[in-house]
Image: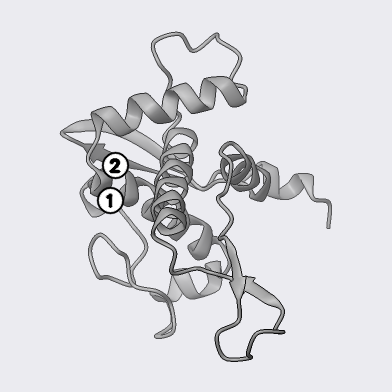
Amino acid sequence: MNIEAFAAKKLETEAKLRGVPIVIRALTSMELKRCAEAFVRPRAPMIADPTKGMLAASIPDEQNEVYRNGKAEWNANTAAAQAVLAAGLDMGDPAVAKDAAWLAKAVEKLRHTLAADEIIRIVSVADRLAMLSLSEEDAKKGLSSTSPASPLTGSTEPPTSPSDTAC
């Protein structure tokens, strides 16, 4: 099967965010990579392994407060970048090149505009669309009992109307 056959199939749904209709789509793996790489991911400082003694190799201190705050910020920025791309958002000039600098500005603007839960809901809808695409046979049957429930409705049914995916 030719990979291009998958490109023709749209994985999107309509939703409402603050009463405004938007189209949310599943992101490609390269778009997800772009979102993750748009911001510098923090690294935990290294410390001696407290369970191994003085000569132990260093391990990451993932409990370090500065690291944890940086990781939370990176997670929030990455989620906002995914929301920007999944909802096709722009900053008033859709003709502008959407490079890494543009994405960083769009993320900052989005995070100043929407609540964190609204951003997470957009990302959740996009993720759910991607998950549903993996098994259309199950979707036609009403989905298997092992399908993930929607983070928005708790349902394992695919979204059928904009109200099913309200943000």
**Residues marked 2 and 1 touching at CB (< 8 Å):** yes
Q: Which mark is residue 81?
A: none
User: Residue 143 falls in which quadrant of the image?
Assistant: bottom left
Name which residue type carries label 2: Ala
Q: Where is residue 47 in the image (x, y as percent from the top left)?
A: 59, 70
Q: Nearer the viewer, residue 104 or 88?
A: 104
Left or right, 124 with reference to 85: left
Q: In this view, does 160 lie above or below 155?
A: above
Residue 49: x percent and y percent?
60, 82
Q: Quadrant of the N terminus?
A: bottom right
Q: Judging from the image, what secondary structure is the residue with disc 1 in?
A: helix
Residue at image mark 2: 15
Q: Camera-side residue: 6 or 31?
A: 31
Q: In this view, does 18 lie above or below 70?
A: above
Q: What residue type is labelled 1?
A: Thr
Above or below: residue 93 compared with residue 85:
above
Which residue lies at the image location 23% right of the left edge and 47% below the top edge? 166
Query: In the rendered image, which residue does mark 1 sit on?
Result: 165
